[in-house]
Image (spheres, helix red, strand yellow):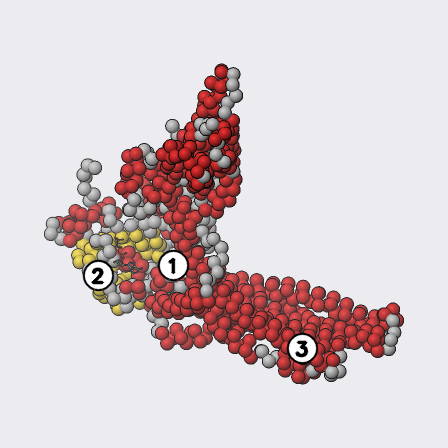
Amino acid sequence: MGDAEASLMLTLLPPAVLLLLLAARLHPCVRAGRRPCRRPTLALAASLLLGLGCACSALLVEPHLWCSHAPSPAWPPAAPAVVGAVGWAVLCEPPPRRAAPPHAALHSFLPPAAGLLVPLTSEIEAQSGRHARSQAFSVAACAARLLPIVFGLARPSSRAHLLPWLPVEAGLLALTLLVGCITSGTPRTLTSAPGCEPLNASLVAVGVSSSARELERVRWDAEQREMERVLPRGLGLCSSVAELWRQHHRMLEEARAMRDEASKADEVATSTTASSQDHERDKEHHTIWHYLWTCCPKVYLFPGLVCSLFLTASSFGTPYVQGVLFDVAVNATFTNGTTIDEAWDSQAVLPLLGAVAGLQASTWLFEVLVGTLYALAAHTALTRLRIRMFHNLVQQDAAFFDAHVSGELSSRLINDSGALQSLAQFTSQNLVQAAVRVLGSIVAMFVTHPLLALLATLVTPVNWFIVHRAGEVSGLYGVVQNGAMAKANAQAVEVLGAMRTVQASTAELREARRFSERINRFLKVVIVTVQCQTAVIFAQLGLSKVRDVLVLGFGMHQVLAGNLTIGSFTAFTTYVSLYEQGFLALANIWLNTKQTLIAAGRFLQLMERQPAILAGVGDSPSSCLGLLEFRNVTFAYPAGIEVPVLRGLSFTVEPGTVVALVGASGAGKSTVGRLIERFYDPQHGALLLDGADYRTLDFRWLRRQIGLVEQEPVLFDCSLLENIKYGNPEASDKCAQTAAERANAHEFIRSLPNGYASMPGEKGTRISGGQKQRVAIARALNKEPRLLLLDEATSALDSTNEAIVQSSLDALMQGRTTVVIAHRLSTVVRATKILVLGDGVVLESGTHSELAADPTSAYARFMQHQLVAPAQQY
Ligand SMILES: Nc1ncnc2c1ncn2[C@@H]1O[C@H](COP(=O)(O)OP(=O)(O)OP(=O)(O)O)[C@@H](O)[C@H]1O
């Protein structure tokens, strides 16, 4: 029986049992022609309705229970209540009517009432997991049984009747609890806990957890629960100020540690010193404005600035004119004793009202214009910044990419630059306006009433101190925030790029959990940041409110003393609010700038970073013979600088010959290939092409002379034709097709529905390994390289594919200097020269027959172990 059938049966079983019981109770009475005992019958009927209701709700409301692949609670939630009700019906065989204790009413009422908890607990279930309902049910059913018993025992009149039934009650309670425990999934909760294997085994033995499928379900449930556990429940507020303080310090420490770590990573990649890092950090502030300025389109910026000025002017004009209007109205009404109508018709009011309307209209218009122009400017600037950043990023050297995870870099490209965009937009939109507002309102306030103005600006230094400190702190918070987001992003990119491996390892939920842990970390940082910002706003607003009360009190005193008119005082309060707005905007700009500048420091470092090997530097000879020489080359990777991989390696490859590199795993064969491509420069010795030192050649010219075919060729999600032309986009389609023909790729490409326009998918997932390899060979052929580098190009293929690819490679090698890194005998034996690498040097060299002739040679040993696969039966 499948899961779905079992669940269905178990859901319908309790109502069926109840129906039978009811029938059994009613049948003798009907036959004897007497009325059945009312209370137990009613209770049974109510329980039956309840059981049916639960079954229907499970069938209709939770159809996922019946879908065989979904894990479901094996027992229906109504079971505990039903067991309780059945027990009650058995227990409550009618006592003599007159002796019926008062608790009997409760007794008959409570078990069905427990059933009402079903809809009530659905909310709890939604919040805390699907088994909450059964647990709540079980507890309610027990309480329903327990309460009337306690109540009955407390009354001497009913105690004698109840005492003989107590053992039965205890048994029923235990049964109800047990059923509730099983249906609520408690055994699964227990068995999924680490170290519970013995319990698990015993549950299997007693039949609670009956099969491997059950164990699988246990695991699935545990993962789902774990998943729900790591979902953020919402903004957790700090329990106390002390806790907030502790979190704040932890965060600062983390921010400093992250900055040091980032500097170290860059030191590894760039070999820059700590002092130069400090110097770079000092330069950051200038650089960021430089970039924002150069990337910002002036066609939006300058009109935006002009509109800002107009907006500020109109926002100052409005309170001034309003003040004058108030004074005119007040004077007309109260001083001269004119009526309101006369005052309204007077010459001054209407023009002043018109002026206010005009000023409001211009404020409205300029506000819209300013917002639009600055938004356009900021978005364009950001796009330009991202393009420049990507441009610089793809030009970095291999050592840089060894030291940085690609997901982290993409996060810097998208998220960190996003912070710059909001800084650019917010600053450009508000800076001029806020500065003019603050300065203008200070001047206007002092002109209106100097003493009141002094009082209004008294809190400014304290406020500014708070903002200044908060700016530095929020900058450090920004570092942690960006770091947390970069880590989450790196994991997402890594997992999404290796989905097949993840799915094959059934690690989807594990990865989802890992991601949620990382993104939760980001949320936690944001929460602490918000809490600290709240503290700053709290302090600032508090000071402002105190200031407002003082200004109002002193202002009213001055109005009553006749030193200030009501109109001037009204205008003054508007100046104060303009000053407040301007100050808050400036404070926000300061905080934003600090946060973005510190947090976007890494982004800028990436923008500014110069690769160790520069393009466009060095010679680009007109021809290339293909004479390659390694002269006493010593090399260690930047990430493992203390362990050299090559230690004085020397060999020569004559033009047009084939040299095979063999050696144990980790001997440095691929490293030789990477040096030939000049992904790295050796620390000592030199590589020479046609007698010219690699360092004197332009590496872009050099790489154009080399065709590379790797063990796992990378195809991009563009058409196969574009993939073939990737190394030489100037080649004509005809040349690309000829290259495909020579690489034995033409036939299979033609057989695809879209031919050369077919998309191979990300990393070429829609075509086979052998086909991918042939496209890669066609790509190398299309470059017409002088030098060929084959890095285990056939080792991932089966023998049929290998034969096809090998014939393609033979076509590719003709007349070209070739370096082959191979594990297979068939690839190596035909080489002009074989070099056996070991300990970072060439241990032996010669042709296959020369080396194989000496049975004691490293090559012979190597052949035995690596090249010739032992023909053993599995
Ligand atoms: N990017 C890197 N950073 C640091 N160390 C590296 C890097 N790439 C390789 N190494 C180390 O350099 C050594 C040589 O690696 P290499 O890939 O050249 O070996 P190989 O002979 O090609 O091995 P295999 O036959 O298994 O592919 C290894 O010890 C490896 O751990």
Count of numbered marks: 3
Which element is circle 2 on? Answer: loop
Q: Which mark is residue 553?
A: 3
- Identify the residue shown where x is 45% and y is 39%: 155
**Residue 759 screen position, x and y as percent:** 46, 45
Q: Quadrant of ligand 1?
A: bottom left
Is residue 431 among the parts visible in the rendering?
A: no
The correct choice, above or below, for 634 with respect to 515 in the image is below
Q: Depth check: 434 or 468 in front?
A: 468
Depth check, mark 2 against mark 1: the one in front is: 1
Which element is circle 1 on? Answer: loop
The correct choice, above or below, for 133 with respect to 29 in the image is below
Q: Which amino acid is tagged 2? A: Gly
Crowd rating for badge 3 (residues with CA inside 10 Å; few <14, some 14–19, many 20+): few
Depth check, mark 3 against mark 1: the one in front is: 3
Residue for badge 2: 840
- Identify the residue shown where x is 23% and y is 53%: 665
Residue for badge 1: 405
Depth check, mark 3 against mark 2: the one in front is: 3
Crowd rating for badge 2 (residues with CA inside 10 Å; few <14, some 14–19, many 20+): many
